[in-house]
């Protein structure tokens, strides 16, 4: 992906979006298909929420073979799960721009993170002193993991999810992008759960906090997991600047300014009229009556 030389340098924050075409998140059955109490940590489910999550509420048939999906519903279980990694940024002279990673935190609304999502009630984890001594079967506490989780820094953790034998949690549905330590608090998941109003939409995947010079080449590694062929759609990766009204498309911001300017002029006109020639309240000259 190249930065056009005639566009000038890109200034941070530089936004990285994925764009999807012909996917209807605004379909009523789709955007109602979730259980808000479950997303906020509840392990119980009422009849209304269970019905809304159909057909993605359980896997298998019969009480003995049935496994509950947590979180349930169409939105959570169609998560955009392509893994996008920024490999390098090279300027037009061939020099590699250092210290310009793509940040994937801070992309979701803070209110969503704080008030709408929480790990299941009873969830816990702890960091092990060393990976050699990290065993999910040892210790005074009960751990549900089969093997410790190792993060990007090489630190090992063991964790506990309640009812793990009869429940498939988010990290098990999307192991390539959701860690068991964050679960539904993963910000890519939270961004996806805020459904789009139109069938063609963009969602924020990350951002770059360093300026990128004109003519530079950005190389991304994309692990393509999200299938678009069956819905006859398309997906794309979009890199754009940010400005005071949001994305790079200035049309909406210009429209706000024009409409606001017209409203301000009309307001000033009516204020001047009221000041210079005010209407007397209760004036009988404005009354209309029929005289016989």
Image (cartoon, rainbow, N blue to C red):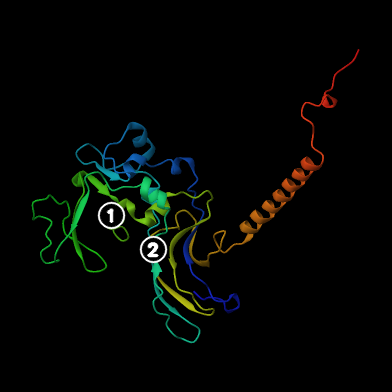
Cβ atoms under marks 1 and 2 closer than 8 Å: no
The answer to whether 32 appears left or right of 5 in the picture is left
Q: Is residue 222 visible in this depiction of the protein?
A: no
Which label's residue is closer to the chain start, 1 or 2? 2
Q: Secondary structure at mark 1?
A: helix
The answer to whether 230 appears left or right of 288 in the picture is left
Total number of numbered discs in the rendering: 2
Residue 43 against residue 155 in the figure, above or below: above
Where does the image place residue 20, in percent across and percent down from the top left? 49, 58
Which residue occupies the extreme top position in the image?
Answer: 292
The answer to whether 199 appears left or right of 270 in the picture is left
Residue assigned mark 2: 104
Residue at x-position 21% and y-position 41%: 65
The answer to which image quadrant residue 145 occupies is bottom left
Cα distance between the residues tagged 1 and 2: 17 Å
Where does the image place residue 135, in percent across and percent down from the top left? 11, 59
Residue assigned mark 1: 171
Residue 14 against residue 166 in the figure, above or below: below
The answer to whether 65 appears left or right of 10 in the picture is left
Residue at x-position 31% and y-position 56%: 174
Q: Residues within 10 Å of mark 1 (few under 14, many from 20)?
A: some
Residue at x-position 27% and y-position 37%: 44
Which residue occupies the extreme bottom position in the image?
Answer: 93
Where does the image place residue 120, in percent across and percent down from the top left? 26, 45
Quadrant (top left, top right, bottom left, bottom right) of the C terminus: top right
Where does the image place residue 36, in percent across and percent down from the top left? 36, 41
Residue at x-position 32% and y-position 60%: 177
Residue 256 against residue 6 in the figure, above or below: above
């Amino acid at each position: 992906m190249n930065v056009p030389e005639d566009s000038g340098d890109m200034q941070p924050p530089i936004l990285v979006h994925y764009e999807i075409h012909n996917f209807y998140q605004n379909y009523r059955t789709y955007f109602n298909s979730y259980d808000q109490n479950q997303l906020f940590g509840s392990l119980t489910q009422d009849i209304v929420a269970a019905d809304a999550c159909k057909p993605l509420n359980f896997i298998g048939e019969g009480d003995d073979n049935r496994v509950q999906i947590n979180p349930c519903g169409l939105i959570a279980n169609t998560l955009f799960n392509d893994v996008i990694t920024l490999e390098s940024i090279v300027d037009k002279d061939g020099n590699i721009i250092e210290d310009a990673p793509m940040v994937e935190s801070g992309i979701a609304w803070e209110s969503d993170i704080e008030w709408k999502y929480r790990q299941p009630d009873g969830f816990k984890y702890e960091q092990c002193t060393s990976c050699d001594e990290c065993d999910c079967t040892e210790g005074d506490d009960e751990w549900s993991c089969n093997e410790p989780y190792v993060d990007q820094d090489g630190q090992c953790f063991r964790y506990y999810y309640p009812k793990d034998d009869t429940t498939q949690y988010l990290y098990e549905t999307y192991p390539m992008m959701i860690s068991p330590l964050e679960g539904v608090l993963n910000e890519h998941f939270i961004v996806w759960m805020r459904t789009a109003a139109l069938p063609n939409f963009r969602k924020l995947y990350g951002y770059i906090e360093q300026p990128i010079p004109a003519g530079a080449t950005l190389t991304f590694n994309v692990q393509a997991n999200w299938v678009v062929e069956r819905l006859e759609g398309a997906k794309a990766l979009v890199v754009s600047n940010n400005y005071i009204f949001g994305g790079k498309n200035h049309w909406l911001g210009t429209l706000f300014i024009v409409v606001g300017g017209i409203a301000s002029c009309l307001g000033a006109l009516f204020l001047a009229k009221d000041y210079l020639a005010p209407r007397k309240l209760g004036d009988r000259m404005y009354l209309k009556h029929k005289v016989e």
